[in-house]
Image (cartoon, rainbow, N blue to C red):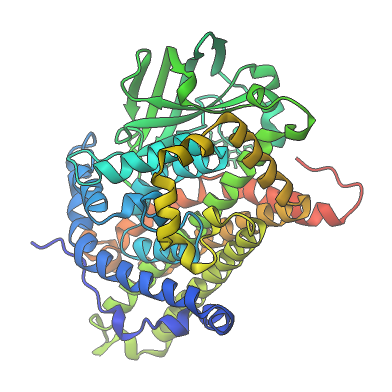
Amino acid sequence: MTYKLNFDQDEHFDFDDNFPSLGALAKYEPAMVERVRKSWEDERRFVREHLAPLVLSEDLQHAKNPDHISWEMLRLAGRHGRLAQYIPGFMGGKGNALGISMMVNLEEQASVDCAFCGMMGGHGLGLAAVFMSLNMKILQRVADRIAARQNEEKPYVIDCAITEPTAGTDVEEVELYPKARLMCQAKRVPGGAVLNGRKVFISTGHMATDHVVIMPFDQKDAVNTMGCFLVAGDTRGFSLGRMERKMGQKAGSASELIFEDCLVPDDNILLTQDQFPGEKFQNQYKFVLHGVLGMTRTAVGAWSTGTARGAFDRALYLAKRIKYKGRTLIHQQWAQAILTNMHINVMMARGAYLDSQFALMRGFEKIPLVTGFPAWIGDSQVLAWLFRQNWYRKFLHSPWMHGQIMDYVRSSISEDQDARVQQISSLAKVVGSDMAMENCQLATEFLGQAGLRHDQGVEKIFRDAKLLQIFEGTNQLNRLNIFTHYLARHLSGVEVF
Ligand SMILES: Cc1cc2nc3c(=O)[nH]c(=O)nc-3n(C[C@H](O)[C@H](O)[C@H](O)COP(=O)(O)OP(=O)(O)OC[C@H]3O[C@@H](n4cnc5c(N)ncnc54)[C@H](O)[C@@H]3O)c2cc1C
């Protein structure tokens, strides 16, 4: 029995048909769009030649042994530079934190394996938090470690821990924090901070070498006392707890992290409110969380679009092979209507995440580190040289410079633009994940027994897709977020959250 996924999407998947908005953008920014296309072609080769052969067999390994960890998949990502895909080229990475390529490539990965993106998702979320802390010293350290260890048995990855056993939705939006029942708390001590408590459902936790942890110094005033820490996996007082037995996305572990008087040295503190006292930096945590969620919800939109496409691709593949009343499904009109619906769903989901991506790029337009725009910036040899110089690093990594960067970035994003990013990224996440589920539903119904068989892949996508509606804020919560940041913004006197 072979567990290899079969593909023939080349027959129907055309870049220009699928990304017409990028075609329009190419008129104004040809170099950037050309870069996106090249990067997409490279991604498409990678997922089909290297990832696809692992997808079903890896899933079966998890079915046989729930404690299995997908090291082989992580090593594959490392060997092919995917762990550095969110780090700009001039910092030793492979791409741009927030370039269009990141989203388009994520869609491509998810179209072959939603679970692979789950494994990468914890790492991506961790990197988004490190980026948004604007702590260049730790960002460079993390980037250096990823680059240096990507070919090792256990490549260097990080995760991001926010959720607690008693607080999930309530820690996804700053407005809900006052209602949250938090159990984690940090305490300032000479030379660092001591962390106590437990985090749960942390993606990639059992694979990560270091962990980005979000924890307040005062549970009763969490938003104003929040800290962001990089906890090394071998720190005394830190341990891994259980790994969840979840229904899908099994390649990515969902882990419990335990902190018992865990001392984090000053050198590993990414950001705390007390580092930047004063009015200028008020609501700093809101700014960081909004930045992270803007990026990650757009990314979940792209990942979900890829998942919707994965269901569609497999349905199309099988429709050309399964016969009904003597004729292959693809020639039956009712089947064509279902397949077209699935394609429409993919296009709607893609439109939503691309719009969100453009809103993000506009929001962060003054920060090329994040947008990767103009196109040459990622590969700039001058910048790469500069970022390797000790004197420059010393300057860039100083606490004074951290404050300057924070000030510059904060003042360059207006409240309106921030609200726009919040609502549209929530929309990309909701539309994408709902479309992913709808396409799985359509594919399963349409294919009969083939839809339920593990070796055809649709059954696995169905299990994987459901999780997309839950993390990065449940879709219910994201709907409220859209209301708050769009509708309520333009209506007076409406009570929200
Ligand atoms: C596979 C997976 C990976 C994850 N990875 C990470 C990770 O890497 N890092 C991390 O920190 N967390 C992670 N999470 C946690 C995730 O963010 C939470 O599961 C999510 O925020 C929902 O929280 P909860 O599960 O506690 O649900 P609850 O908050 O208990 O919600 C239960 C139900 O109540 C609804 N609800 C709750 N509050 C409201 C409200 N105010 N208004 C309307 N409806 C509401 C919810 O929509 C939901 O339907 C992950 C979760 C999963 C499933």
Picture layout, residue 221 above or below residue 492: above
Location of residue 70 (image quadrant): top left
Q: Position of residue 496 (x, y in %)?
A: 79, 43
Let me know if residue 71 appears in the view. Answer: yes
Task: Using the image as rendered, state which of residue 79 and residue 338 is in the foreground.
Answer: 79
Let me know if residue 173 appears in the view. Answer: no
Picture residue at 76% right of the left edge, 56% below the top: 486
- Quadrant where ligand 1 appears: top right
Task: Using the image as rendered, state which of residue 479 and residue 21 is in the foreground.
Answer: 21
Picture residue at 37% right of the left edge, 61% below the top: 110
Left/right of residue 2 with respect to residue 226 in the rendered view: left
Task: Using the image as rendered, state which of residue 34 and residue 470 is in the foreground.
Answer: 34
The C terminus: image quadrant: top right
Picture residue at 51% right of the left edge, 31% below the top: 163
Picture residue at 36% right of the left edge, 30% below the top: 210
Q: Position of residue 359 (x, y in %)?
A: 64, 62
Picture layout, residue 274 above or below residue 101: above
Picture layout, residue 19 above or below residue 231: below
Residue at the farthest left position: 1
Left/right of residue 393 with respect to residue 227 in the rendered view: left
Left/right of residue 383 with respect to residue 413 in the rendered view: left
Picture layout, residue 335 above or below residue 342: below
Task: Using the image as rendered, state which of residue 376 and residue 445 is in the foreground.
Answer: 376
Location of residue 348 (image quadrant): bottom right
The N terminus: image quadrant: bottom left
Q: Position of residue 450 (x, y in %)?
A: 26, 68
Q: Position of residue 317 (x, y in %)?
A: 28, 77
